[in-house]
Image (cartoon, grey):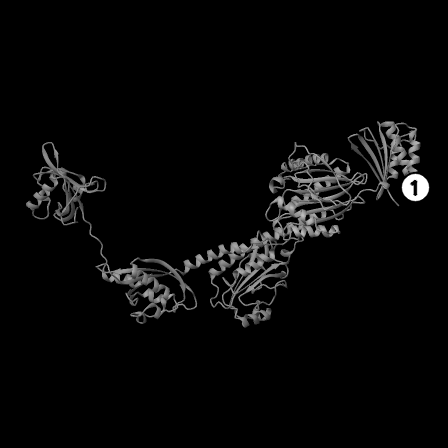
Amino acid sequence: MSSGRNGSEVPPSAGPGGLLDASDDAAAVISADGIVTGWTRAAEALLGYSAPEVVGHSAARLLATPGDPVRVAGVAERCREGMGWSGLIPVQHRDGSRIDVDLRVSASFRIGTDECFLISARELKQQWTVGQSILDGFLTRSPVGMAVMDAQLRYVWLNDTLERFGGVPREQRLGRRLSDVLPGLHAETIEGLMRKVLATGIPVTDYEYVGWSWSDPRRQHAYSTSFFPLVNADDTVTGICYMVLDVTERWNARQLLSLVNEAGTCVGRTLDVTRTAQELADFAVPRFADFVYVDLLEPVLSTEGHGTWLSDAGPPAAKPVMRRVGMSSVRKGCPEAVVRVGEKLDFIPPPYNVNLLIDGEPIFIPVLDPANLQWVAEQPARSARIREFGLHSLISVPMRARNTVLGLTTFVRSLNPVSFQPDDVLLARELVARAALCVDNARRFSREHAAAVTLQRNLLPHALTGGSALDVASSYLPADPTGGVGGDWFDVIPLSGARVGLVVGDVVGHGITAAATMGRLRTAVQTLADMDLPPDELLAHLDDLVLRLSEEEDDTETARETSTTVLGATCLYAVYDPVTRRCTMARAGHPPPIVLSPDGHVYYPELPAGPPLGLGGMAFEAAVIELAENSLLGLYTNGLIEGADHDMGLGLDRLALALSQPEPDLDALCATAVQRLVPVPQPDDIALLLTRMHALNTDDVASWEVPFDPAAVSDVRLRVTRQVQAWGLEELAMTTELIASELVTNAIRHAAGPVRLRLLRNSRLTCEVSDGSNTAPRLKHARSTDEGGRGLFLVAQFAHRWGTRYTPEGKIIWTEQEIP
């Protein structure tokens, strides 16, 4: 190992950059007898001799000092043993000047029969040294505060910067501890860190803290400090050197960024305009200001769909009317406020320029003067509050989002003695900009939600009646506004033959699209039900309709841009016949109905599930159940049974328990069940349709088999007349006789047997004629010369309504007459 520059030996190195890496050095080859046999261009550049001038001559003339034969012999012997040598040697330039070089000699090697050595040299450059005066000036005037403390943590030395940071003269610090000089500037914590460094010898770097100092007592400063041990020759820690850097600007920037990020999580947590405004006020107090109020324009708070004030529309003719929607203060009850939350105002801070709201530039008043003529003349009440509560600094920032003017947010300081600074204006703008976007989102959502709720309520039935077949009660609960309006619907549809159609459905998705789709499907169900289609066929037609709507909307540019495509729906359709007490049902992916028998038995009929509407290509199946009189049938949507646990099985159990309560009033039972199952707002709509079934009295039904013979028509007329008179409906005897006669005659002439006639008396008088043909009758307008063809026309004139429905055996032509 080499010991440095004293010429002692070092082992050779084989790798690049090692001892023999002479790629950048002057190199020469010297024989054992001291003759130069090789000379490089680098050697020529270093000493000025060309190769012809050196090669073949003794190397001794290149030395600047007399040669030392003993030392040279020792070096040569070491190199012959395979060890290298390095040291400092003075050499002589061709011009006679002396050059100190770092000389390296390789292990000996042979060229032919001659023993040789590789010599490499590199000039030693003069190191730059710092004078004591320069060092003293640097330490004294460095932008970093520095101090030296002894083992008792007393000041031994400090520079001018540290003296300026603390505002305490150097003479008052020397010999004293930090806690004696600046007791309030985190002195105990800092001295604790110093003791730790004294005990462990491990430095502490970049410890940041915030505090006050005598140099600037009205403003907080942030400092970054580092502590290093002072170690003497025997590695004993004798003191502490600490450095202080004022990082107030960096600290403030970081705090502002943190404050803005925190605002993103605290402001705008709900889609409610007033709550968002209040969240902004609550967040800024006391983090940023002592008193904050948020005033929004009146149209922003409206959910009626009126337009808001666009910034490119220019200022209004007069001061815009605003309403205070949020306010917070460090003082309980906000006594500084002239206007309370909910009240109207038209106040804009001086200079009272309405363009403030348009331009979006904040008003910054670093020092509020209550004696200012503008305040005293225009706002005497506010001037008095400024004086009374010491309001001394103000920033007002317009709230604007998406080219829409929303209102004004004002920040005021009073208890905080530090006035707002220009950097605070940037923070205020950022806070208000984020809050404005949330307010605008809430405003847009509130209007869309209100429109969707209005649309949905208008599309739902306003009054339900089951006639004499059943009692009806319903409950609809819209979703929580954050979940959006859903597409739940229900309906009760009067059918021919005293029957009633019951339907409940749920459209996939939320919002106006779901509500509009619900209205289209409800209309479609009413139309299909009016055609007296069986439940399974009705759902098949409805499935085709949903599929077609989806395809049509997929092909439109509007649907692609707004994603309003109908995704699907679930539905359950049931038809109850009070004569037979049978209920035929079919469902399309919808939860099964619930049945409560008069004896208290509760069950869910096993119905084929069926695919949801909109899939296409899959069949629906119907099932028939018989219901005892006064049975309770409940149809509902999935939001009623999902619950917080989203367990459908438990939800069905809860529904059965809720409907099993002894409550004779159907409306009260329906409302109580919904309240019990859904006590808090939920993200999905709730629909519940309850019906209590009644059976048509046998005395109100009369039916006859009609022989397939035209001569039987006279007997039919007689029986019908007697039955209608027996029911006390003499006023309808003649028209009913005519209707029955025409329908039976048409069935015998144009259809196939068997023919059957049935009369029903409930809310209307129904006449039904069934036959074995599937051919529908057609209403014609006979000419004056025709001898026939007027029968069905007369039937249509006398009946309130009439129609045809098909059965597995044929068809039924029915008429209804209003009972006087």
Local crowd size for mark 1, using a 10 Å CA cut-off: few (<14), some (14–19), many (≥20): some
Residue 60 placed where, x, y %? 8, 43
Left or right, residue 601 beside residue 352: right
Q: Which residue is mark 1?
A: 725
In the depicted view, which residue is nearer to us: 532 or 602? 602
The answer to which image quadrant residue 248 occupies is bottom left
Q: Please identify the residue farthest to the front as the structure is shown.
A: 599
Is 547 placed above or below 149 here?
above
Q: State how many labels appear.
A: 1
Residue lying at 44% horizontally and 59% vertically, measured from the top left: 252
Q: Amino acid at mark 1?
A: Gln
Left or right, residue 755 beside residue 448: right
Left or right, residue 231 beside residue 634: left
Left or right, residue 366 beside residue 78: right
Disc 1 is placed on an element classified as: helix
In the depicted view, which residue is nearer to us: 558 or 309? 558
Residue 460 seen anywhere in this rendered image of the structure:
no
Is 535 placed above or below 682 here?
above
- Tell me the quarter of the image containing the C terminus: top right
Q: Please identify the residue farthest to the left as the structure is shown.
A: 69
In the depicted view, which residue is nearer to us: 655 or 498? 655
Residue 658 placed where, x, y %? 68, 49
Residue 711 placed where, x, y %? 92, 28
Residue 191 seen anywhere in this rendered image of the structure:
yes
The answer to which image quadrant residue 542 occupies is top right
Residue lying at 6% horizontally and 45% vertically, measured from the top left: 70
Residue 52 placed where, x, y %? 12, 37
The answer to which image quadrant residue 700 occupies is top right
In the depicted view, which residue is nearer to us: 667 or 92? 667
